[in-house]
Image: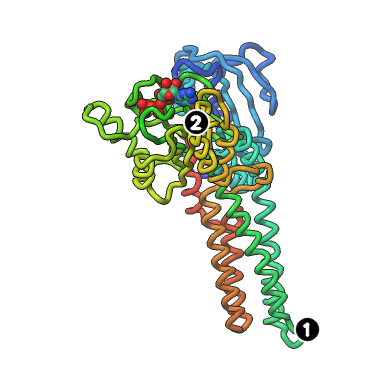
Amino acid sequence: MSGPGSTIAAIATAVAAGVGSVAIVRISGPQAQAVGRRVFRPAGKRYQAWESHRVLYGHVVEPASGQVLDEVLLLYMQAPRSFTGEDVVELHCHGGLVCVQRVLEQVLANGAEAAAPGAFSQRAVLHGRLDLTQAEAVAQVISARSRRAAALALAGLNGGIYRRIERLRQQLLEQLAHLEAHLDFEDDLPPLNPETVKEKMQAVAEDLSRLVEDSRRGQRLQQGLRVAIIGCPNVGKSSLLNCLSGHDRAIVTDYPGTTRDIVETELILGDVPITLVDTAGIRHTSNPVEKLGIARSRQVFTQVDVIVLLFDVNMGWSETDQALANELPEEVPQLRVGNKVDLLDKSSNQSNNLSKFPLAISAMTGQGIEAFTQALLNCCGLTDLESLDTSLNRRQISVAQKAIESLICLDNTAKAELPWDFWTIDLRDAIQHLGGITGKDVSEDILDEIFSKFCIGK
Ligand SMILES: Nc1nc2c(ncn2[C@@H]2O[C@H](COP(=O)(O)OP(=O)(O)OP(=O)(O)O)[C@@H](O)[C@H]2O)c(=O)[nH]1
Ligand SMILES: [Mg+2]
Protein backbone atom coordinates (compact mmCIF):
# COMPACT_ATOMS: atom_id res chain seq x y z
CA MET A 1 0.00 0.00 0.00
CA SER A 2 1.13 3.55 -0.69
CA GLY A 3 2.09 5.41 2.50
CA PRO A 4 -0.58 6.98 4.70
CA GLY A 5 0.38 10.51 3.64
CA SER A 6 -0.02 9.82 -0.07
CA THR A 7 -2.99 10.65 -2.26
CA ILE A 8 -4.62 7.61 -3.81
CA ALA A 9 -7.23 7.03 -6.48
CA ALA A 10 -9.28 4.17 -7.92
CA ILE A 11 -12.58 3.42 -9.58
CA ALA A 12 -15.04 2.88 -6.71
CA THR A 13 -17.90 1.38 -8.71
CA ALA A 14 -18.24 -1.89 -10.65
CA VAL A 15 -16.58 -1.68 -14.05
CA ALA A 16 -18.27 -3.43 -16.96
CA ALA A 17 -18.69 -2.70 -20.64
CA GLY A 18 -22.03 -1.27 -21.67
CA VAL A 19 -23.64 -1.14 -18.24
CA GLY A 20 -24.07 1.36 -15.39
CA SER A 21 -25.01 4.93 -16.20
CA VAL A 22 -22.61 6.34 -13.62
CA ALA A 23 -19.10 5.31 -12.54
CA ILE A 24 -17.10 6.96 -9.77
CA VAL A 25 -13.39 7.73 -9.52
CA ARG A 26 -12.49 8.33 -5.89
CA ILE A 27 -9.43 10.33 -4.85
CA SER A 28 -8.36 10.45 -1.20
CA GLY A 29 -5.48 12.15 0.57
CA PRO A 30 -3.98 15.56 1.28
CA GLN A 31 -3.51 16.31 -2.44
CA ALA A 32 -7.02 15.24 -3.47
CA GLN A 33 -8.18 18.77 -4.15
CA ALA A 34 -4.98 19.73 -5.99
CA VAL A 35 -5.23 16.65 -8.23
CA GLY A 36 -8.92 17.34 -8.85
CA ARG A 37 -8.26 20.95 -9.79
CA ARG A 38 -5.63 19.89 -12.32
CA VAL A 39 -8.03 17.70 -14.30
CA PHE A 40 -11.44 19.31 -13.67
CA ARG A 41 -12.75 22.28 -15.64
CA PRO A 42 -15.89 23.76 -14.05
CA ALA A 43 -18.69 24.59 -16.45
CA GLY A 44 -19.07 28.14 -15.18
CA LYS A 45 -18.02 30.60 -12.51
CA ARG A 46 -20.51 29.32 -9.99
CA TYR A 47 -18.71 25.96 -10.00
CA GLN A 48 -15.31 27.45 -9.22
CA ALA A 49 -15.48 27.62 -5.42
CA TRP A 50 -15.00 24.19 -3.90
CA GLU A 51 -17.26 24.04 -0.90
CA SER A 52 -17.26 20.79 1.02
CA HIS A 53 -20.17 18.44 0.30
CA ARG A 54 -21.41 20.51 -2.67
CA VAL A 55 -21.74 19.07 -6.17
CA LEU A 56 -19.92 20.82 -9.01
CA TYR A 57 -20.59 20.33 -12.70
CA GLY A 58 -17.96 20.37 -15.44
CA HIS A 59 -15.54 18.28 -17.50
CA VAL A 60 -12.44 16.23 -16.93
CA VAL A 61 -9.78 17.26 -19.40
CA GLU A 62 -6.27 16.32 -20.30
CA PRO A 63 -4.54 19.42 -18.83
CA ALA A 64 -1.84 19.84 -21.50
CA SER A 65 -4.11 19.65 -24.57
CA GLY A 66 -7.43 20.63 -22.99
CA GLN A 67 -9.02 17.56 -24.61
CA VAL A 68 -12.31 16.70 -22.90
CA LEU A 69 -12.36 13.16 -21.52
CA ASP A 70 -15.79 13.14 -19.89
CA GLU A 71 -18.62 15.27 -18.62
CA VAL A 72 -18.73 14.82 -14.84
CA LEU A 73 -20.14 15.82 -11.49
CA LEU A 74 -17.52 16.49 -8.85
CA LEU A 75 -18.09 16.02 -5.14
CA TYR A 76 -15.52 17.39 -2.71
CA MET A 77 -15.60 16.16 0.89
CA GLN A 78 -13.22 17.96 3.19
CA ALA A 79 -11.37 16.05 5.91
CA PRO A 80 -12.44 14.67 8.31
CA ARG A 81 -16.04 14.49 7.01
CA SER A 82 -15.44 11.79 4.41
CA PHE A 83 -15.39 8.00 4.19
CA THR A 84 -11.62 7.86 4.72
CA GLY A 85 -11.42 10.81 7.10
CA GLU A 86 -9.12 12.53 4.56
CA ASP A 87 -9.87 15.07 1.84
CA VAL A 88 -11.84 13.15 -0.78
CA VAL A 89 -12.80 14.10 -4.32
CA GLU A 90 -15.24 11.95 -6.23
CA LEU A 91 -15.62 12.30 -9.97
CA HIS A 92 -18.97 10.93 -11.12
CA CYS A 93 -18.32 9.96 -14.73
CA HIS A 94 -20.31 8.11 -17.37
CA GLY A 95 -20.58 4.37 -16.81
CA GLY A 96 -19.20 1.60 -18.99
CA LEU A 97 -15.52 1.00 -19.48
CA VAL A 98 -13.92 3.77 -21.46
CA CYS A 99 -14.65 7.21 -19.97
CA VAL A 100 -14.09 6.23 -16.37
CA GLN A 101 -10.80 4.54 -17.18
CA ARG A 102 -9.53 7.55 -19.10
CA VAL A 103 -10.50 9.80 -16.20
CA LEU A 104 -8.65 7.53 -13.75
CA GLU A 105 -5.57 7.53 -16.00
CA GLN A 106 -5.58 11.34 -15.99
CA VAL A 107 -5.96 11.49 -12.21
CA LEU A 108 -3.03 9.10 -11.84
CA ALA A 109 -0.96 11.15 -14.29
CA ASN A 110 -1.62 14.27 -12.22
CA GLY A 111 -0.39 13.41 -8.78
CA ALA A 112 -2.44 10.52 -7.38
CA GLU A 113 -1.17 6.97 -6.85
CA ALA A 114 -3.17 3.87 -7.74
CA ALA A 115 -4.97 2.67 -4.60
CA ALA A 116 -4.13 -0.82 -3.35
CA PRO A 117 -7.03 -3.21 -2.61
CA GLY A 118 -8.96 -2.05 0.46
CA ALA A 119 -6.85 1.11 0.79
CA PHE A 120 -9.82 3.47 1.28
CA SER A 121 -11.32 1.28 4.01
CA GLN A 122 -7.93 0.88 5.67
CA ARG A 123 -7.56 4.65 5.82
CA ALA A 124 -11.08 4.93 7.24
CA VAL A 125 -9.96 2.60 10.06
CA LEU A 126 -6.65 4.40 10.59
CA HIS A 127 -8.47 7.73 10.92
CA GLY A 128 -11.06 6.30 13.29
CA ARG A 129 -13.99 6.73 10.87
CA LEU A 130 -14.78 3.02 11.15
CA ASP A 131 -13.61 0.28 13.47
CA LEU A 132 -12.18 -2.83 11.87
CA THR A 133 -15.43 -4.81 12.12
CA GLN A 134 -17.35 -2.02 10.39
CA ALA A 135 -14.83 -1.85 7.56
CA GLU A 136 -15.09 -5.62 7.10
CA ALA A 137 -18.89 -5.35 7.13
CA VAL A 138 -18.76 -3.00 4.14
CA ALA A 139 -17.48 -5.90 2.04
CA GLN A 140 -20.30 -8.10 3.35
CA VAL A 141 -22.98 -5.50 2.66
CA ILE A 142 -21.78 -5.26 -0.93
CA SER A 143 -21.63 -9.01 -1.49
CA ALA A 144 -24.97 -9.80 0.22
CA ARG A 145 -27.22 -11.88 -2.04
CA SER A 146 -30.45 -11.70 -0.06
CA ARG A 147 -32.27 -9.05 1.98
CA ARG A 148 -31.71 -10.95 5.22
CA ALA A 149 -27.96 -11.31 4.48
CA ALA A 150 -27.79 -7.56 3.75
CA ALA A 151 -29.63 -6.76 7.00
CA LEU A 152 -27.17 -8.90 8.97
CA ALA A 153 -24.19 -7.23 7.30
CA LEU A 154 -25.70 -3.80 7.96
CA ALA A 155 -25.95 -4.65 11.66
CA GLY A 156 -22.16 -5.14 11.57
CA LEU A 157 -21.72 -1.88 9.71
CA ASN A 158 -23.73 -0.12 12.40
CA GLY A 159 -21.30 -1.38 15.02
CA GLY A 160 -23.23 -4.47 16.22
CA ILE A 161 -20.15 -6.73 16.16
CA TYR A 162 -17.96 -4.09 17.75
CA ARG A 163 -20.38 -3.50 20.62
CA ARG A 164 -20.90 -7.19 21.35
CA ILE A 165 -17.17 -8.01 21.35
CA GLU A 166 -16.18 -4.85 23.18
CA ARG A 167 -18.68 -5.59 25.98
CA LEU A 168 -17.06 -9.01 26.48
CA ARG A 169 -13.57 -7.54 26.31
CA GLN A 170 -14.48 -4.98 28.97
CA GLN A 171 -15.76 -7.77 31.25
CA LEU A 172 -12.44 -9.57 30.88
CA LEU A 173 -10.48 -6.36 31.44
CA GLU A 174 -12.41 -5.78 34.65
CA GLN A 175 -11.46 -9.24 35.91
CA LEU A 176 -7.85 -8.69 34.92
CA ALA A 177 -7.81 -5.42 36.86
CA HIS A 178 -9.19 -7.26 39.94
CA LEU A 179 -6.58 -9.99 39.67
CA GLU A 180 -3.72 -7.57 39.18
CA ALA A 181 -4.81 -5.35 42.06
CA HIS A 182 -4.98 -8.46 44.17
CA LEU A 183 -1.49 -9.53 43.13
CA ASP A 184 -0.05 -6.10 43.93
CA PHE A 185 -1.95 -5.33 47.13
CA GLU A 186 -2.91 -8.71 48.45
CA ASP A 187 -2.69 -7.70 52.08
CA ASP A 188 -4.88 -4.61 51.75
CA LEU A 189 -7.75 -6.21 49.82
CA PRO A 190 -10.42 -8.75 50.78
CA PRO A 191 -9.58 -12.24 49.46
CA LEU A 192 -10.70 -13.06 45.91
CA ASN A 193 -13.20 -15.84 45.45
CA PRO A 194 -11.90 -18.12 42.65
CA GLU A 195 -15.41 -19.45 41.99
CA THR A 196 -16.78 -15.97 41.26
CA VAL A 197 -13.91 -15.20 38.88
CA LYS A 198 -14.37 -18.58 37.18
CA GLU A 199 -18.10 -18.06 36.72
CA LYS A 200 -17.57 -14.68 35.11
CA MET A 201 -15.03 -16.13 32.68
CA GLN A 202 -17.32 -19.00 31.85
CA ALA A 203 -20.17 -16.61 31.10
CA VAL A 204 -17.94 -14.78 28.62
CA ALA A 205 -16.81 -18.07 27.04
CA GLU A 206 -20.43 -19.21 26.66
CA ASP A 207 -21.50 -15.94 25.09
CA LEU A 208 -18.58 -16.15 22.65
CA SER A 209 -19.41 -19.77 21.77
CA ARG A 210 -23.02 -18.79 21.03
CA LEU A 211 -21.76 -15.98 18.84
CA VAL A 212 -19.48 -18.36 16.91
CA GLU A 213 -22.38 -20.79 16.46
CA ASP A 214 -24.66 -18.00 15.17
CA SER A 215 -21.88 -16.77 12.93
CA ARG A 216 -21.59 -20.16 11.23
CA ARG A 217 -25.25 -19.81 10.26
CA GLY A 218 -24.60 -16.21 9.29
CA GLN A 219 -21.75 -17.32 7.03
CA ARG A 220 -24.02 -19.80 5.31
CA LEU A 221 -26.64 -17.11 4.86
CA GLN A 222 -24.02 -14.78 3.45
CA GLN A 223 -22.46 -17.29 1.10
CA GLY A 224 -25.69 -19.06 0.23
CA LEU A 225 -26.15 -22.79 -0.25
CA ARG A 226 -25.19 -24.94 -3.20
CA VAL A 227 -27.81 -27.62 -3.54
CA ALA A 228 -27.62 -30.52 -6.01
CA ILE A 229 -30.61 -32.50 -7.22
CA ILE A 230 -29.47 -36.06 -7.77
CA GLY A 231 -31.44 -39.16 -8.72
CA CYS A 232 -32.25 -41.79 -11.28
CA PRO A 233 -33.39 -40.72 -14.76
CA ASN A 234 -36.92 -39.40 -15.17
CA VAL A 235 -37.72 -38.93 -11.49
CA GLY A 236 -38.35 -35.21 -12.10
CA LYS A 237 -35.06 -33.49 -11.18
CA SER A 238 -35.26 -30.90 -13.94
CA SER A 239 -38.96 -30.40 -13.20
CA LEU A 240 -38.07 -29.63 -9.57
CA LEU A 241 -35.45 -27.09 -10.64
CA ASN A 242 -38.02 -25.42 -12.91
CA CYS A 243 -40.69 -25.51 -10.21
CA LEU A 244 -38.42 -23.85 -7.61
CA SER A 245 -36.98 -21.26 -9.97
CA GLY A 246 -40.39 -20.42 -11.40
CA HIS A 247 -39.38 -20.72 -15.04
CA ASP A 248 -38.47 -23.34 -17.65
CA ARG A 249 -34.73 -23.29 -17.09
CA ALA A 250 -34.02 -26.97 -17.82
CA ILE A 251 -35.41 -29.20 -20.56
CA VAL A 252 -38.04 -31.65 -19.31
CA THR A 253 -39.23 -34.65 -21.36
CA ASP A 254 -40.59 -38.05 -20.52
CA TYR A 255 -37.47 -39.66 -22.03
CA PRO A 256 -35.13 -40.96 -19.33
CA GLY A 257 -31.67 -39.44 -19.87
CA THR A 258 -32.85 -35.98 -20.97
CA THR A 259 -30.41 -33.88 -18.94
CA ARG A 260 -26.77 -34.32 -19.95
CA ASP A 261 -25.01 -31.18 -18.78
CA ILE A 262 -25.04 -29.62 -15.35
CA VAL A 263 -27.72 -26.92 -15.24
CA GLU A 264 -27.44 -24.24 -12.53
CA THR A 265 -29.83 -21.56 -11.41
CA GLU A 266 -29.77 -18.93 -8.65
CA LEU A 267 -32.78 -18.35 -6.46
CA ILE A 268 -33.80 -17.16 -2.99
CA LEU A 269 -35.66 -19.57 -0.72
CA GLY A 270 -36.79 -18.30 2.69
CA ASP A 271 -34.34 -15.39 2.42
CA VAL A 272 -31.41 -17.71 1.72
CA PRO A 273 -29.56 -17.41 -1.59
CA ILE A 274 -29.42 -20.83 -3.23
CA THR A 275 -27.54 -22.13 -6.22
CA LEU A 276 -29.55 -25.07 -7.45
CA VAL A 277 -27.71 -27.65 -9.54
CA ASP A 278 -29.62 -30.05 -11.79
CA THR A 279 -27.72 -33.14 -12.88
CA ALA A 280 -27.98 -35.99 -15.35
CA GLY A 281 -29.96 -38.97 -14.03
CA ILE A 282 -27.58 -41.70 -12.88
CA ARG A 283 -27.86 -45.18 -14.45
CA HIS A 284 -25.84 -47.71 -16.47
CA THR A 285 -25.86 -46.65 -20.09
CA SER A 286 -23.92 -47.31 -23.26
CA ASN A 287 -24.66 -43.87 -24.71
CA PRO A 288 -21.28 -42.04 -24.68
CA VAL A 289 -22.86 -38.57 -24.28
CA GLU A 290 -25.05 -39.64 -21.39
CA LYS A 291 -22.01 -41.34 -19.80
CA LEU A 292 -20.15 -38.02 -19.82
CA GLY A 293 -23.17 -36.32 -18.24
CA ILE A 294 -23.32 -38.96 -15.50
CA ALA A 295 -19.59 -38.52 -14.80
CA ARG A 296 -20.28 -34.80 -14.32
CA SER A 297 -23.16 -35.56 -11.93
CA ARG A 298 -20.78 -37.62 -9.81
CA GLN A 299 -18.29 -34.73 -9.66
CA VAL A 300 -21.04 -32.53 -8.22
CA PHE A 301 -21.50 -34.80 -5.16
CA THR A 302 -18.55 -33.32 -3.29
CA GLN A 303 -18.97 -29.73 -4.41
CA VAL A 304 -22.28 -28.91 -2.74
CA ASP A 305 -23.64 -28.13 0.74
CA VAL A 306 -26.73 -30.33 0.47
CA ILE A 307 -27.82 -33.16 -1.82
CA VAL A 308 -31.48 -33.64 -2.62
CA LEU A 309 -31.86 -37.28 -3.54
CA LEU A 310 -35.01 -37.41 -5.62
CA PHE A 311 -36.97 -40.60 -6.35
CA ASP A 312 -40.36 -41.46 -7.77
CA VAL A 313 -42.70 -41.99 -4.83
CA ASN A 314 -44.92 -44.23 -6.99
CA MET A 315 -42.05 -46.69 -7.44
CA GLY A 316 -40.98 -46.37 -3.81
CA TRP A 317 -37.38 -46.26 -2.64
CA SER A 318 -35.70 -48.80 -4.93
CA GLU A 319 -32.43 -50.70 -4.73
CA THR A 320 -31.04 -48.37 -7.38
CA ASP A 321 -31.91 -45.38 -5.18
CA GLN A 322 -30.20 -47.07 -2.24
CA ALA A 323 -27.10 -47.85 -4.33
CA LEU A 324 -26.95 -44.20 -5.33
CA ALA A 325 -27.39 -43.07 -1.72
CA ASN A 326 -24.46 -45.33 -0.74
CA GLU A 327 -22.27 -43.56 -3.28
CA LEU A 328 -22.84 -40.11 -1.77
CA PRO A 329 -20.19 -38.61 0.52
CA GLU A 330 -21.16 -38.98 4.17
CA GLU A 331 -20.17 -35.45 5.13
CA VAL A 332 -22.71 -33.82 2.81
CA PRO A 333 -26.23 -33.70 4.30
CA GLN A 334 -28.80 -35.56 2.19
CA LEU A 335 -32.49 -35.04 1.88
CA ARG A 336 -34.49 -37.91 0.41
CA VAL A 337 -37.52 -36.59 -1.40
CA GLY A 338 -40.27 -38.54 -3.17
CA ASN A 339 -41.60 -36.82 -6.29
CA LYS A 340 -44.78 -37.21 -8.38
CA VAL A 341 -47.02 -37.53 -5.33
CA ASP A 342 -49.88 -36.24 -7.49
CA LEU A 343 -49.87 -39.58 -9.35
CA LEU A 344 -50.03 -41.65 -6.19
CA ASP A 345 -53.11 -43.84 -6.04
CA LYS A 346 -54.24 -43.26 -2.47
CA SER A 347 -56.48 -46.32 -2.46
CA SER A 348 -53.65 -48.72 -3.31
CA ASN A 349 -50.94 -49.85 -0.93
CA GLN A 350 -48.53 -47.53 -2.75
CA SER A 351 -49.69 -44.91 -0.29
CA ASN A 352 -47.66 -46.78 2.34
CA ASN A 353 -44.74 -45.04 0.69
CA LEU A 354 -46.01 -41.79 2.11
CA SER A 355 -45.62 -42.87 5.71
CA LYS A 356 -42.08 -44.08 4.98
CA PHE A 357 -41.08 -40.88 3.22
CA PRO A 358 -42.52 -37.83 4.86
CA LEU A 359 -41.02 -35.55 2.22
CA ALA A 360 -43.32 -36.15 -0.74
CA ILE A 361 -43.72 -33.46 -3.36
CA SER A 362 -45.03 -32.85 -6.81
CA ALA A 363 -42.75 -30.80 -9.02
CA MET A 364 -45.72 -30.60 -11.39
CA THR A 365 -48.46 -29.25 -9.07
CA GLY A 366 -46.27 -27.68 -6.37
CA GLN A 367 -47.73 -29.92 -3.65
CA GLY A 368 -45.39 -30.28 -0.64
CA ILE A 369 -42.85 -27.76 -1.96
CA GLU A 370 -43.25 -25.49 1.08
CA ALA A 371 -42.46 -28.32 3.52
CA PHE A 372 -39.56 -29.41 1.31
CA THR A 373 -38.09 -25.89 1.35
CA GLN A 374 -38.34 -25.77 5.14
CA ALA A 375 -36.65 -29.17 5.45
CA LEU A 376 -33.88 -28.04 3.11
CA LEU A 377 -33.15 -24.89 5.14
CA ASN A 378 -33.57 -26.77 8.38
CA CYS A 379 -30.89 -29.31 7.59
CA CYS A 380 -28.43 -26.41 7.29
CA GLY A 381 -29.68 -24.55 10.38
CA LEU A 382 -31.06 -21.77 8.22
CA THR A 383 -34.57 -21.42 9.60
CA ASP A 384 -35.52 -18.89 12.29
CA LEU A 385 -33.20 -16.30 10.80
CA GLU A 386 -34.94 -13.42 12.60
CA SER A 387 -33.11 -14.39 15.79
CA LEU A 388 -29.77 -13.93 14.05
CA ASP A 389 -28.61 -10.40 14.80
CA THR A 390 -24.80 -10.55 14.80
CA SER A 391 -22.53 -12.58 12.59
CA LEU A 392 -18.76 -12.64 12.49
CA ASN A 393 -16.91 -13.22 9.25
CA ARG A 394 -14.51 -16.13 8.78
CA ARG A 395 -11.47 -14.25 10.10
CA GLN A 396 -13.35 -13.00 13.12
CA ILE A 397 -14.70 -16.50 13.88
CA SER A 398 -11.20 -17.95 13.93
CA VAL A 399 -9.95 -15.18 16.24
CA ALA A 400 -13.00 -15.61 18.52
CA GLN A 401 -12.17 -19.31 18.70
CA LYS A 402 -8.67 -18.48 19.88
CA ALA A 403 -10.20 -16.31 22.62
CA ILE A 404 -12.44 -19.24 23.63
CA GLU A 405 -9.38 -21.52 23.75
CA SER A 406 -7.60 -19.06 26.06
CA LEU A 407 -10.66 -19.06 28.34
CA ILE A 408 -10.65 -22.88 28.34
CA CYS A 409 -6.96 -22.78 29.35
CA LEU A 410 -7.93 -20.35 32.08
CA ASP A 411 -10.55 -22.77 33.31
CA ASN A 412 -7.94 -25.54 33.45
CA THR A 413 -5.57 -23.22 35.30
CA ALA A 414 -8.38 -22.53 37.78
CA LYS A 415 -9.16 -26.24 38.19
CA ALA A 416 -5.47 -26.97 38.83
CA GLU A 417 -5.63 -24.26 41.52
CA LEU A 418 -2.54 -22.55 40.12
CA PRO A 419 -1.56 -19.15 41.57
CA TRP A 420 -3.37 -15.98 40.38
CA ASP A 421 -0.55 -14.79 38.12
CA PHE A 422 -1.07 -17.87 35.92
CA TRP A 423 -4.71 -16.82 35.51
CA THR A 424 -3.67 -13.41 34.27
CA ILE A 425 -1.61 -14.94 31.45
CA ASP A 426 -4.61 -16.72 29.86
CA LEU A 427 -6.84 -13.78 30.54
CA ARG A 428 -4.49 -11.40 28.78
CA ASP A 429 -4.41 -13.74 25.78
CA ALA A 430 -8.20 -13.79 25.58
CA ILE A 431 -8.36 -9.99 25.84
CA GLN A 432 -5.76 -9.64 23.11
CA HIS A 433 -7.69 -11.95 20.78
CA LEU A 434 -10.91 -10.01 21.26
CA GLY A 435 -8.99 -6.82 20.50
CA GLY A 436 -7.86 -8.55 17.32
CA ILE A 437 -11.49 -8.74 16.20
CA THR A 438 -12.32 -5.07 16.73
CA GLY A 439 -8.93 -3.76 15.64
CA LYS A 440 -7.99 -2.48 19.12
CA ASP A 441 -5.14 -4.92 19.25
CA VAL A 442 -3.85 -5.66 15.75
CA SER A 443 -0.48 -5.05 14.21
CA GLU A 444 -0.04 -3.10 11.00
CA ASP A 445 0.97 -6.31 9.18
CA ILE A 446 -2.29 -7.99 10.08
CA LEU A 447 -4.27 -4.93 9.00
CA ASP A 448 -2.40 -4.94 5.67
CA GLU A 449 -3.26 -8.59 5.22
CA ILE A 450 -6.94 -8.11 6.05
CA PHE A 451 -7.36 -5.19 3.67
CA SER A 452 -5.39 -6.82 0.86
CA LYS A 453 -8.31 -9.25 0.51
CA PHE A 454 -10.69 -6.40 -0.27
CA CYS A 455 -11.11 -5.32 -3.86
CA ILE A 456 -9.61 -2.23 -5.43
CA GLY A 457 -11.73 0.89 -4.90
CA LYS A 458 -13.10 -0.20 -1.53
N1 LIG B 1 -47.25 -36.21 -12.78
C1 LIG B 1 -46.02 -35.75 -12.54
N2 LIG B 1 -45.11 -35.81 -13.50
C2 LIG B 1 -43.88 -35.31 -13.27
C3 LIG B 1 -43.56 -34.71 -12.04
N3 LIG B 1 -42.27 -34.32 -12.10
C4 LIG B 1 -41.82 -34.63 -13.32
N4 LIG B 1 -42.79 -35.23 -14.04
C5 LIG B 1 -42.68 -35.75 -15.38
O1 LIG B 1 -41.67 -36.74 -15.39
C6 LIG B 1 -40.96 -36.70 -16.63
C7 LIG B 1 -39.48 -36.56 -16.37
O2 LIG B 1 -39.24 -35.30 -15.78
P1 LIG B 1 -37.82 -34.61 -15.78
O3 LIG B 1 -37.92 -33.41 -14.94
O4 LIG B 1 -37.31 -34.44 -17.16
O5 LIG B 1 -36.98 -35.75 -15.06
P2 LIG B 1 -35.41 -35.80 -14.78
O6 LIG B 1 -35.21 -36.46 -13.47
O7 LIG B 1 -34.81 -34.47 -14.95
O8 LIG B 1 -34.92 -36.77 -15.90
P3 LIG B 1 -33.45 -36.93 -16.54
O9 LIG B 1 -32.97 -35.58 -16.92
O10 LIG B 1 -33.69 -37.78 -17.71
O11 LIG B 1 -32.59 -37.60 -15.55
C8 LIG B 1 -41.54 -35.56 -17.43
O12 LIG B 1 -42.51 -36.06 -18.32
C9 LIG B 1 -42.21 -34.69 -16.36
O13 LIG B 1 -43.29 -33.95 -16.86
C10 LIG B 1 -44.58 -34.66 -11.02
O14 LIG B 1 -44.39 -34.20 -9.91
N5 LIG B 1 -45.78 -35.18 -11.34
MG1 LIG C 1 -33.38 -33.78 -16.20
Mark 2 vs mark 1: in front: 1
Q: Considering depth in this image, is 289 or 360 the residue closer to the camera?
A: 360
Q: Considering depth in this image, is 314 or 166 the residue closer to the camera?
A: 314
Amino acid carrying label 1: it is: Pro
Q: Can the viewer see residue 378?
A: yes
Q: Residue at x 44, y 18 (%)?
A: 17
- What SS does tag 2 mark? strand
Q: Residue at x 51, y 34 (%)?
A: 274
Q: Pointer 1: what residue?
A: 190
Mark seen at residue 10: 2
In percent of width and height, residue 442 lies at: 55, 56
In percent of width and height, residue 418 lies at: 59, 83
- Indicate the colouring scheme: rainbow
Mark seen at residue 24: none
In 3D space, how far apart are the residues under numbered discs 2 and 1 (Cα atoms)? 60 Å
Q: Considering depth in this image, is 126 or 328 the residue closer to the camera?
A: 328
In percent of width and height, residue 281 lies at: 35, 31
Q: Is residue 55 above or below residue 345?
A: above
Q: Can the viewer see residue 105?
A: no
Find residue 264 and report its image quarter: top left
Q: Residue at x 46, y 32 (%)?
A: 314
In percent of width and height, residue 401 lies at: 54, 60
User: How many discs appear?
Assistant: 2
Callout 2 crowding tier (Cα within 10 Å): few <14, some 14–19, many ≥20: many
Q: Is residue 157 left or right of residue 453?
A: right
Ligand 1, image quadrant it occupies:
top left
Amino acid carrying label 2: it is: Ala
